[in-house]
Image: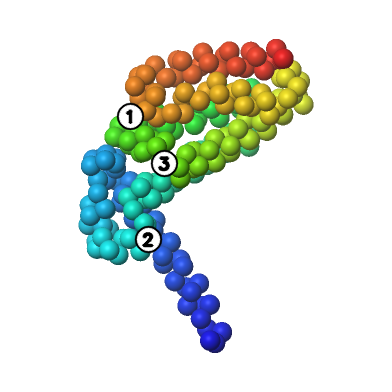
Amino acid sequence: MDGSEPNFISAAAPERDKTREAIISRALTLFQHYGYSKTNISDIATACEMSAGNLYRYFRNKQAIGHAVVKGYFEQEEICTSAVHADRSLGAEARLRALVTAGVTHTVDHLRKFPKIVELAEMICETEDGRELIADHVQHRKAVFSSIIRDGIEAGEFRVTNPDAAARAVQMGTKFFHVPFAIARHGLDQVEEDLELTLDLLCAGLRGGC
């Protein structure tokens, strides 16, 4: 074996990643239009102009593609909310409200445009890999909540003593609004008002302390 082999391997990796991203993108378009359940591997392969056998070189099954789509969605949401988290021109309560609202709005906007995408949310809740994906995203959100609440305690805005416990309470209190099929059934037009009421109560608790 000579020293040139690693160069071939590293050169192939970006191309493979590019193909995977193309598969995910085209699968998302199909899921949005037809729904997850009515889209099959052959449909995705045809959209990607490749054979189903070739597609299996990149993803083991449709479920794995669905997980990749959802992972990308979670990453988009985290990017969407990161700017709010970093905005030190706002007080802690304002940042917390804006961050939660931005995340929920991200979900609501997608559901308005592509209601069939809710099938992906139902699918990942039924699989072990999907639940792990959700758990990682929830943990990230909770860590951001904790960071903002800690800032609020230091600034004298919040009177709670345990930012991690308070973040968990905020997480549980707003959990409903981060479940796509739940808010879709609840009614998207009602989500904004109900979220504001929920945040009023949670922030009052943070200010009052416990």
User: For residue 34, what is the image quadrant?
Assistant: top left
Q: Vertically, is 164 above or below 131?
A: above
Q: Quadrant of the C terminus?
A: top right
Nearer the observer, disc 1 or disc 3?
3
11 horizontally vs 90: left or right: left
Pointer 1 or 3: first along the chain:
1
- Give me the residue at 47% from left, 77% from top: 8
Q: First in sequence: mark 2 or mark 3?
A: 2
Is the C-beta separation of discs 2 and 3 under 8 Å?
no
The residue drawn where x is 46% and y is 29% is: 178
User: Measuring 36% from the left and 38% from the top, which residue is drawn there?
Assistant: 123
Q: Image quadrant of residue 144?
A: top right
Going from N to C along the chain, the mark reached first, 2 or 1, is: 2
Q: On the image, numbered disc 1 is attached to which residue?
A: 112
Disc 2/disc 3 C-alpha distance (Å): 20 Å
Amino acid on which disc 2 is placed? Tyr
10 Å neighbourhood of mark 1: few (<14), some, or many (≥20)? few
Name the residue beneath numbered marker 3. Answer: 127
Left or right position of 49 against 13: left
> Looking at the image, is mark 2 or mark 3 nearer the viewer?
3
Asked which secondary structure carries label 2, the reply is loop
Q: Secondary structure at mark 3?
A: loop
Image coordinates for residue 183, horizontal then vertical, percent: 39, 23
Looking at the rendered structure, the secondary structure element under dot 1 is helix
Identity of the residue drawn at 75% across and 22% down: 161
Q: CA distance from mark 2 to mark 1?
A: 31 Å
Residue 87 picture location, percent across and down: 63, 34
Residue marked by disc 2: 58
- Residue 17 in view in this figure: yes
Q: Is residue 193 above or below residue 80?
A: above
Q: Which tag is nearer the camera, tag 2 or tag 1?
A: 2
Rendering coords of residue 182 (x, y %):
39, 24
